[in-house]
Image: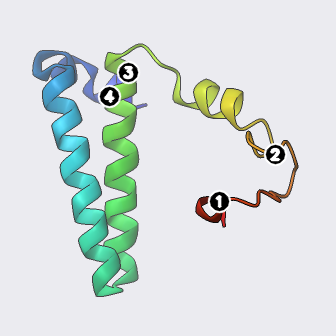
C-alpha cells in the first residue's frame, strides 16, 4: 500500500531524506510517549511504520519478509518462543 501511494514521491526525495523523516517521526513518538496521550502515541506509531515502510521500499526491502526472517516466532538470541535471555537489555 505504501509503495502504491507514496513511492513516486519517496523516490524523488531519496533514501537519505526519507531516513531523516523516519528519525524525526521516532523523536515525535518519544515525545508522545512522555505525554501519555494514547491517541497521539497511536498516531506517531502509525507515522513511524509508514516512514519505515517508505524507506524499506526505497531500499527494496520487504518489511514483512525481513521481520519474519529475523523473528520467526521465536527470539533470535535464545531461540525460544518465549524469550529467556539473561542479558539485561533483553528484559
- Between tags 2 and 3, which lies in front? 2
Tag 2 or tag 1, which sits nearer the N-term? 2
User: Do residues under tags 2 and 4 come within 8 Å of each other at their CB atoms?
Assistant: no
Q: Which of 43 and 90 is in front in this view?
A: 90
**Label 1 secondary element:** helix
- Between tags 2 and 4, which lies in front? 2
On screen, residue 88 versus residue 76, left or right, reads: left
Tag 3 or tag 2, which sits nearer the N-term? 3
On screen, residue 16 versus residue 6, left or right, reads: left
> Up-down: is 89 above or below 54?
below
From the image, tell me which residue sits under label 3. 57
Q: How far apart are marks 2 and 4 (CA)?
A: 29 Å
Crowd rating for badge 2 (residues with CA inside 10 Å; few <14, some 14–19, many 20+): few
- Residue 1, percent across and down? 43, 31
From the image, tell me which residue sits under label 2. 78
> Up-down: is 20 above or below 24?
above
From the image, tell me which residue sits under label 1. 90
The residue depicted at 66 percent of the width and 67 percent of the height is: 91
| Residue 90, quarter of picture | bottom right
Amino acid at each position: 500500500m505504501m509503495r502504491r501511494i507514496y513511492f513516486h514521491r519517496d523516490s524523488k526525495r531519496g533514501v537519505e531524506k526519507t531516513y531523516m523523516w523516519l528519525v524525526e517521526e521516532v523523536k515525535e513518538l518519544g515525545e508522545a510517549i512522555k505525554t501519555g496521550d494514547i491517541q497521539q502515541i497511536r498516531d506517531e506509531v502509525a507515522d513511524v511504520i509508514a516512514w519505515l515502510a517508505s524507506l524499506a521500499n526505497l531500499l527494496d526491502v520487504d518489511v514483512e519478509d525481513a521481520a519474519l526472517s529475523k523473528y520467526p516466532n521465536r527470539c533470535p538470541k535464545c531461540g525460544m518462543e518465549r524469550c529467556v535471555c539473561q542479558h539485561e537489555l533483553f528484559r
